[in-house]
Each structure stands twice: as structure tokens, then as C-alpha cells.
Amino acid sequence: MNSPVPAPKPRTSKFWLGISVVLTLVLLIGAATTASMYEQLKTQIVHLQQRLAVTPQVRYVSVLLDAQELPALLVTLDPQAGVLQVQRLNEVKEGREDSMQLWALAGDQPPRSLGVIESKFKTLQLPAKEAALEGVTQLAISVENKGGVPQAAGPRLPYLFQGWLVQKAI
């Protein structure tokens, strides 16, 4: 009897075997790199979102001008922090017995006090809510007795600095 001859097994050349191993390694490295880059991108997005949340979001801007139409003060509102940021742009300082008081002007309505500037520094903050500037068209500074005047009394002297209030687009 003739015994069946086993069928010869197909042989894979070492060259193709090596290429398949290399390609498998390349695919694994590519998948690991993609996963790593994805995680890094997610981390960067979270970090940038956190930084954006604490970055001041200026909504209102006003440059107060002196009598010669030169910039004297820059006032901005950060509604997230609830503060008016006031920056002196000139060297005018109030006297020992005087205070500068910030006023909100809204058409024919009486001026509303937004606070007294009590710091001699170039930059300071006054607490304020965004609602305090609704309907306001201008900001002004008057020189008052030390500590300012009550809001009901209004400013006692003409305004030293005055400027339009601009609401930025959101």
C-alpha cells in the first residue's frame, strides 16, 4: 500500500517573517504614541481651561481724561472678580486732606459713587458689581474731603477727570 505522503508545509521566508515583526512593532509603537499624545492634549486643554477661568474678563473700559484731554486714569471692570481696576496714567495725587472719588454718570440721573480712591499706588481695586455700571455712559473723578462724600450729597467740586464708559463685546 501506498501510504499517503504528507503535504508539504508552506514555508515562510525569513525575510517576510522579519517584515511582519517589524510592521507589528511599528503599529504597536504608533498606537502607544497616539494614546500618549491624546492624553497630553486632554491635559493641556484642562490646564488652559483652568487658566482661562482665572484670567480677568474685562467687560467695561474707560479712559478718564484731564482738562487738557490727556489720559489720567484707566478704569476696567472684571465682573468675575467683582472689582473695578483703576490705574493711574499720570502723576496727579490727592493732598493729605483730600480723596479722589469715582462717580458713575448716567444721563440726567444724579451721579452715583463707585468708591473712594484711598491708595497712592499706581494700580488699585474697588469692589463693584457689573450691575453698578448698567446704564452708565461716563465715569468721573472728583476731589473730595478725606474719605469722600456721601452718595446722596454728590460731588462738591467739578470733575477733575472724566471719560466715556465703553462696554466690550462679549
Image (cartoon, rainbow, N blue to C red):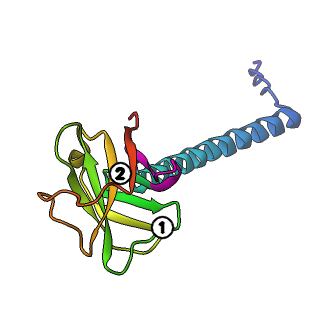
Asked if residue 134 lies in the magenta stretch, the reply is no
Classify residue 136 by image quadrant.
top left
Which amino acid type is marked by label 2?
A: Leu
Residue on which disc 2 sits: 77
Instruction: Indicate whether 134 appears above or below 73.
Output: above
Task: Count residues near mark 1 (Cα–Cα under 10 Å), then give few for <14, some for 14-19, many for 20+.
Answer: few
Residue 112 appears at what percent x and percent y? 20, 52
Asked if residue 59 lies in the magenta stretch, the reply is yes
Q: Earlier in the sequence, mark 2 or mark 1?
A: 2
Q: Is residue 26 left or right of residue 119?
A: right
Pick the front one: 39 or 28: 39
Classify residue 5 by image quadrant.
top right
Residue located 19% across and 37% down the image? 108
Q: Secondary structure at mark 2?
A: strand
Instruction: Indicate whether 168 appears above or below 111.
Output: above
Do tag 2 and tag 1 residues touch (Cβ < 8 Å)? no
Instruction: Indicate whether 149 appears above or below 135.
Output: below
Residue on which disc 1 sits: 92
Residue 119 appears at what percent x and percent y? 38, 74
Quadrant where the C terminus sits is top left
Instruction: Indicate whether 157 appears above or below 65.
Output: below
Residue 143 appears at what percent x and percent y? 32, 65
Task: Count residues near mark 2 (Cα–Cα under 10 Å), then give few for <14, some for 14-19, many for 20+.
Answer: many
- Magenta region: 57-73
